[in-house]
Amino acid sequence: MAEYVYPTVPSPLRIMLCGNAAAAWYEEDDHVRSTEVLPAFIECFRKITEELGARCITTFDDDLLMVGVPRSRDWSFYAVYEAADLQTVTAMVNLFRMPIQGVRLDKYFCIEVMVGREFFPAESTVSSLH
């Protein structure tokens, strides 16, 4: 018999980082994108996991059927993490505000983080398969 599980703040926090490329990404020179912006972007995600200790659970990029700045929805890429606490989540967002390898990623990407919990009906189904 299924039972509703009332929400509580999970530990670790389950978060979803949502993002999209801003107009500056598309307007930037291809060489600058590939030699400066993209390496800084990759370094940002390395810092999230290796320095801040957030564990990436999964990622999703919906660029298979969409190009350019999203119009019908706000975001085009997503990453689900487990993070120790709200300070860690804030530090993740702040990485996009500070220069990484001389690049401020908030010029090129819009980021928002949602804090939630496991979707228990689906999680219980997945865990029963293992």
Image (cartoon, rainbow, N blue to C red):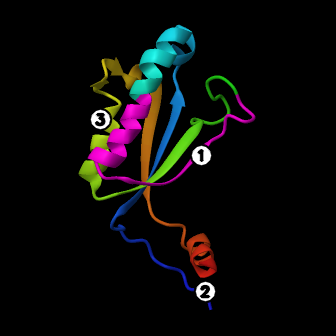
* Amino acid type, callout 2: Ala
Of badges 3 and 1, the one in the foreground is 1
Q: In which image quadrant can residue 47 be found?
A: top left
| Crowd class of label 2 (few under 14; some 14 to 19; many from 20; radius 10 Å) | few
Q: Residue at x 51, y 10 (%)?
A: 31
* First of labels 2, 3 by sequence position: 2
Indicate yes or no whether the magenta region holds residue 59: yes
Rendering coords of residue 34 (x, y %): 51, 18
Check the image and name the residue furthest to the bottom: 1
Asked whether residue 108 is in view, the answer is no
Residue under pointer 2? 2
Spatial CA distance of label 2 from label 3 is 40 Å
* First of labels 1, 2 by sequence position: 2
| Crowd class of label 3 (few under 14; some 14 to 19; many from 20; radius 10 Å) | few
Label ID, residue 76: none
Indicate the secondary structure of the residue bearing disc 1.
strand
Residue under pointer 3? 94
Residue under pointer 1? 60
* Amino acid type, callout 3: Asn
Q: Which residues are magenta?
A: 41-66
Q: In which image quadrant can residue 120 be found?
A: bottom right
Indicate the secondary structure of the residue bearing disc 2.
loop
* For the residues bearing labels 2 and 3, Cβ distance under 8 angstroms: no
Spatial CA distance of label 1 from label 2 is 29 Å
Indicate the secondary structure of the residue bearing disc 3.
helix
Q: Residue at x 45, y 64 (%)?
A: 117
